[in-house]
Image (cartoon, rainbow, N blue to C red):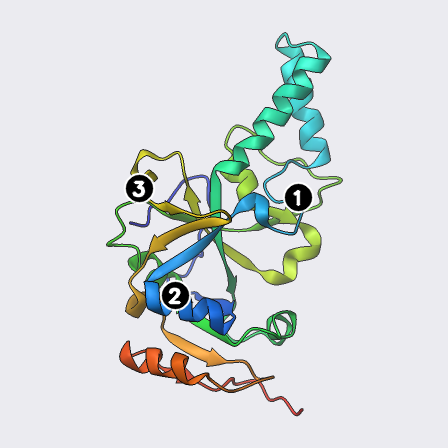
Amino acid sequence: MYETYQALTVPTNSRQSLWRYFSFERLRDLLITGELFFTHLPKFSDGREGSLTARTRQHLFSWFVNHGSGPDKAWREVEEYEKLHTHFYVSCWHMNNGESYLMWKAYADSGCAVQTTFERVQASFDNFSGVISGGVVEYVDFERDITPLGNTFNHVITKDLPYSDEREFRLVFWRPDPRNQDAALEQNGARVCVDLRMLINRIYLNPFSPSVPPEIYKLLQERGIECSSSTINHTP
């Protein structure tokens, strides 16, 4: 099931369009298994995923010192706090009312884009025995900003300012939740069952290579999922 979590900001419009740019290999896996892959947060290339900003680390260090910890112990406690992000797995989606040329360029080797809406995403987890949450990512200056403490979800949906063009909505799977103990984990992530017909509103083809492998096209037909050419004009 999808569960709204108070620490996470959600789109103001339930029909907000969400996009996920997939390689055909990843789309094939989704269509065959009916499972959405959530990447283990530490596996992302951005070394700051789930970490504290510089000023937030210093602020937390000062809090531990003021509450009786010596400097060495205080820094260890800061590091232990940051390690809490290792319990999280996420699926990243792009918020936009239409296709994004920048996102296509960034994922030019991807085969397609899955288009859905916030309300469809929520409903797609109705038959999942565990729980999924989600939130709009906040982009902050990791050298200057202080972010809220006391809830690790705050840092799981915080990213460095240079990534702000991604306009990300992030689905979050928190492993310690007792309802999530039966989910299948892999080396780099977790698999979560979804209702494909609800999750996927339409598939759009990459304007830089607008062709569909026959196996993918067959899978889309079998599942009654519509596939369209990109609306972005591109001249090779």
Disc 3 residue type?
A: Asp
Q: Residue at x 71, y 14 (%)?
A: 72
Q: Quadrant of the C terminus?
A: bottom right
Separation of marks 3 and 2 at Cα, in angstroms: 19 Å
Disc 2 residue type?
A: Leu
**Left or right: 226 in relation to 22:** left
**Left or right: 192 in relation to 75:** left
Q: Which residue is mark 2?
A: 30
**Left or right: 173 in relation to 48:** left
- In the rendered view, tell whether residue 189 sits above or below residue 219: above
Residue 123 x/y as whole percent:
29, 59
- In the rendered view, tell whether residue 139 sits above or below residue 152: below
Q: Residue at x 62, y 75 (%)?
A: 108
Disc 1 residue type?
A: Arg
Q: Which residue is mark 3?
A: 182
Please state which of residues 215 and 197 is positioned toward the viewer in this rendering: 215
